[in-house]
Amino acid sequence: MGVFDKALALEMLPDQWLVGDDKCDCTFQRIGEWGNPYIGKSLQVRLCCIWAELAKEYPQFVQEVDCYWDRNLIEPVMGAQPWDSEEMDMPLDIWYRQLASEQNRPLVEIREEYRHKQHLRPRKTARGTGRESAQPDKHEVRHAMLNRLEKTGWRRDDAIATFERRDREERDAQARH
Ligand SMILES: [Zn+2]
């Protein structure tokens, strides 16, 4: 392929899809990616959009709720939480979706309105005040693990006994050092 052909081919390429590119209205964007330099091909699949179509056929297998299931605590967190990253400003795609959630309005409408109000986008928080600094203590971690184990069929007593046994083993191991 000549230099000129290559430049033309590059120009003809569609934009590469990336998670967070906000190029669809799905609440959670998911993109499947495959590529191989030796074949010289890439395959990108906007899984979120395909799932959205599938979900229409099988609504009984889809559960969309107005809360965030805390994966560690296995407890629902109600309402959109304020941005509290110490690393970065709020990404555009998340900001638009947060506003849509808070104002209960369609994403398309929000995007149209707020693309001109970038100065309102939440900035990163000061060091020591954000999510990264808030580490759960041992008690909270235990509570979360108990919750999770109980929901998957463990008896509370058995789970606690297991924790206590592990604590003992840990102490014994430390004592040997
Ligand atoms: Zn999508």
Image (spheres, helix red, strand yellow):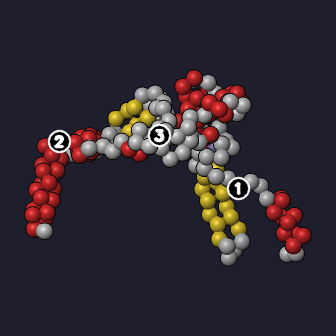
Q: Is residue 31 above or below residue 64?
A: below
SS for dot 1: loop
Instruction: Kindly indicate the quadrant of the structure image that contains residue 155.
Output: top left
Q: Earlier in the sequence, mark 1 or mark 2?
A: 1
Would the CB of label 1 be found within 8 Å of ligand 1?
no
* Residue 175 x/y as whole percent: 9, 63
The residue carrying mark 3 is 126
Q: Is residue 73 above or below residue 41?
A: above
Quote the CA–CA distance across marks 1 and 2: 49 Å
* Residue 75 x/y as whole percent: 34, 35
Instruction: Kindly indicate the quadrant of the structure image that contains residue 67.
Output: top left
Give residue 156's mark.
Answer: 2
Return the residue found at the far right: 4
Residue drawn where x is 71% and y is 68% of the image: 41
Residue drawn where x is 60% and y is 34% of the image: 121
Residue drawn where x is 43% and y is 35% of the image: 68
Q: Amino acid at mark 2?
A: Arg
Q: Is residue 66 above or below residue 128?
A: above
The residue carrying mark 1 is 16
Q: Nearer the viewer, mark 1 or mark 3?
A: 3
